[in-house]
Amino acid sequence: MEDLLRRVDTSPTPGPAQPRTALTRVASFGTNPGNLGMLTYVPDQLAPSPALVVVLHGCTQSPAAYNDGAGWSDLADRHGFVLLFPEQTKANNPKACFSWFLPHDTARGSGEAESIRQMIEAAAAEHGIDRSRIFVTGLSAGGAMAAAMLATHPELFSAGAIIAGLPYGAAGNVQEALNAMFQGQNRPASEWGDLVRSASPHRGAWPRISIWHGAADQVVKPGNAAELVKQWTNVHGLPITPDERSFFAGNSREVWHDASGAEVIESFDIAGMGHGTPLAVGEGDMEGGAAGAFMLDVGISSTHHIAGFFGLTEEAAGHTAIRSKPTIRAQVASSGREALDGEILPPRRETRQEGGHFDPETFGVPASLPPQVLRVIQNAFQAAGLVKR
């Protein structure tokens, strides 16, 4: 049983391939108690006091494969920030999964978490990193480890992004990890929040959080995204109900703001997507990367959006990186009813409209749409309880 999670194989292991972008291996960066490898990517044109993005690969992946798929080095070239890629070793886990489910490896000052912290310190010193602009992101086991880093070392990170991951403290052994992945857990928000607060002595500002999950994920149950929301809204002292909810191409984005109105938590639910990182493969400004194992071309670039959420690019945090002018069927609210083909509904603060009259522009719906389309949208909003009948 101790080796079960290490032997779980959710897809064929991809064969070796020559990476499109060369990463640099760093031989020494500290005591490395977690026995991890360290690779970096430094663009030729580095910004003054550059930012640092820590990228954690998923199971069966290598840093190079994940970078090629997600396209992080392309954005680093364009915007002058440094990338750090911790690498799981086969000696630790035959499937190259970070040990997000082992307490020793996800505790402050020990194991893999301490190795990653040492890498960050080494990269920051080597490249003159702006300490106020250090970020972390990861997929699956890497996403769960990103959550662990945000919990155990919140003072290091301005923000983080968790893709198909799990809340910090969701498991303490192999059996609990399998249960969390395939069944999920339903804990009170305060309990999830206490796990983060007890992971470090930090009591200052908490990192901003971006959460991504496929609605059809069969490897890590989508309910884990909802538990992540509960965990981090509680840590930030925010209600569980989002301040904004927007819908585009069948996907949804929920947003929570702090007292100043800044976006501090967002959660994406990607319709029909299985287990992997959402991509928009192509040559456009908001496209990139390459489809492959656990790298899914679903028409929305999580990499571009996350970079915007981190403040690394010219795109505003609220701008969704999705293919321009796609043909969509926009899923409206939770009723399961759909609008006809049309433009993407822009992010708007959710409004519950009183009275029987439906004002489309209140919800970001173009009033110029054909009447029959507006009726379908109105019926969907009524079914969701956003507009009284």
Image (cartoon, rainbow, N blue to C red):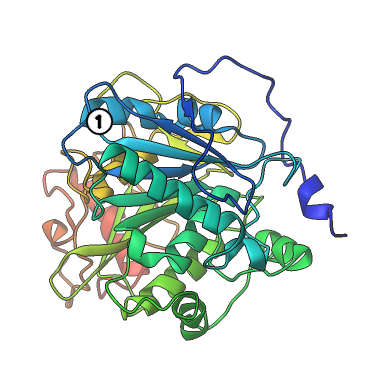
Residue at position x 41%, y 78% from top? 201
The part of the image, by quadrant, that contains residue 154 is bottom left
Residue at position x 56%, y 51% from top? 31
Total of numbered circles in the picture? 1
The part of the image, by quadrant, that contains residue 46 is top left
Q: Quadrant of the N terminus?
A: bottom right
242 sits left or right of 174 in the view: left
x, y percent for residue 355: 16, 77
Residue at position x 30%, y 25% from top? 43
x, y percent for residue 375: 25, 54
Image vertical order of residue 186 relative to residue 58, above or below: below
- The amino acid type found where label 1 is placed reads Lys
Image vertical order of residue 303 relative to residue 208, above or below: above
x, y percent for residue 246: 28, 56
The residue beneath circle 1 is: 325
Please state which of residues 363 and 56 is positioned toward the viewer in this rendering: 56
164 sits left or right of 356 in the view: right
Tag 1, which secondary structure?
loop
Residue 312 visible in the displayed image = yes
Residue at position x 29%, y 42% from top? 307
268 sits left or right of 1 in the view: left
Image vertical order of residue 350 relative to residue 286, above or below: below
Residue 165 visible in the displayed image = no
The 10 Å Cα crowd at callout 1, few under 14, some 14 to 19, many 20 or more, is: few
Q: Quadrant of the C terminus?
A: bottom left
